[in-house]
Image (spheres, helix red, strand yellow):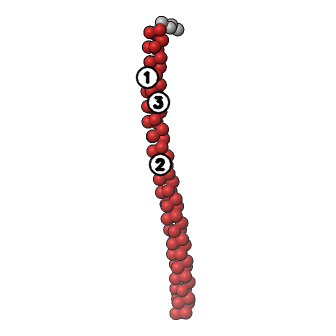
Amino acid sequence: MSDERITLDFAGTRLLGLTAEMRELQQRFSGTEVRLGSLETRFSGLESRFAGLEARFDGMERRMAVLEERITHLISLVVRIAERQGVRE
């Protein structure tokens, strides 16, 4: 490269090309950033929905525990009534 001379026009053209490539990369990164932001929003929405489902399942679990306790009391009551009436297995 020592034999070749770099002209101002060549340097300017090369600089313009590099500037255009950098601008294109910046636009691509901006587009990617927007897409990632959209994905983040969607994942946040999913997280909220899963939290809602978790709360509903917790409520169902509590109701099932109460129902199980009531059934246990009902069975004990039926057994006591049967014992008083003299019913055997």
| Residue named by callout 3 | 67
Cβ atoms under marks 2 and 1 closer than 8 Å: no
Q: Amino acid at mark 2?
A: Gly
Q: For the N terminus, give its image quadrant.
A: bottom right
Reply above or below: 87 against 19: above
Cβ atoms under marks 2 and 3 closer than 8 Å: no
Question: Residue 72 placed where, x, y %?
Answer: 45, 23
SS label for mark 2: helix
Q: Is residue 18 visible?
A: no
Which label is found at residue 51? Answer: none
Foreground label between 2 and 3: 3
Q: Residue furthest bottom?
A: 8
Left or right of 80 in this view: 13? right
- Within 10 angstroms of label 3, few (less than 14), some, or many (20 or more) residues? few
**Residue at screen point 54% across, 66% down:** 35
Question: Residue 58 placed where, x, y %?
Answer: 45, 40
**Residue at screen point 52% across, 59% down:** 42
Q: Amino acid at mark 1?
A: His
**Residue at screen point 47% across, 25% down:** 71
Which label is found at residue 52? Answer: 2
| Residue named by callout 1 | 73
